[in-house]
């Protein structure tokens, strides 16, 4: 999530002009950059929850791969329902 926000800031500030530049800079595929940036489609409440998880507890429990299907849901209320099914 932090990476997606950082990349968005770089794009918004026009330091980088597109995701292909991010991919080259980070040595990732453009597809991987797209997957990470898609986390920004999550409802704000979900983003806040993810960012509030202390790094020592391991954010990997909520991996990008696990969240990916939720990013494809347009309605934020539906996203929240799906997200609550993932967390204990």
Image: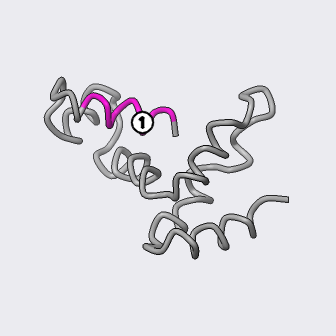
Identify the image quadrant of residue 50: top right
Residue 68 is situated, as x and y percent measured from the top left of the image, at 52, 61
Left or right, 37 with respect to 50, comes to: left
Q: Secondary structure at mark 1?
A: helix
Q: Residue at x 60, y 53 (%)?
A: 45
Q: Is residue 88 above or below residue 19?
A: below
Which residue occupies the extreme right position in the image? 88
Q: Confirm whether the magenta stretch covers residue 5.
A: yes
Q: Which residues are magenta?
A: 2-10
| Residue topped by disc 1 | 5
Q: Is residue 33 above or below residue 17?
A: below
Residue 81 is situated, as x and y percent measured from the top left of the image, at 67, 73
Left or right, 26 with respect to 68, comes to: left
Quick one: quadrant of the C terminus?
A: bottom right
Q: Main secondary structure of the magenta part?
A: helix
Left or right, 72 with respect to 77, comes to: left
Identify the image quadrant of residue 56: top right
Q: Residue at x 73, y 66 (%)?
A: 84
Q: Is residue 75 above or below residue 47?
A: below
Residue 19 is situated, as x and y percent measured from the top left of the image, at 23, 41
Q: Confirm whether the magenta stretch covers residue 15.
A: no
* Label 1: how many Cα within 10 Å (few below 14, some 14–19, many 20+): some
Q: Residue at x 50, y 57 (%)?
A: 42
Q: Residue at x 27, y 25 (%)?
A: 25
Identify the image quadrant of residue 11: top left
């Amino acid at each position: 999530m932090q990476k997606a926000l950082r990349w968005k800031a770089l794009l918004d500030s026009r330091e980088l002009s597109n995701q292909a530049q991010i991919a080259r800079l980070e040595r990732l595929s453009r597809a991987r950059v797209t997957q990470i940036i898609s986390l920004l489609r999550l409802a704000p409440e979900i983003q806040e929850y993810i960012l509030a998880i202390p790094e020592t507890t391991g954010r990997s429990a909520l991996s990008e791969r696990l969240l990916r299907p939720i990013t494809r849901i347009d309605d934020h209320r539906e996203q929240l329902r799906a997200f609550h099914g993932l967390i204990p």
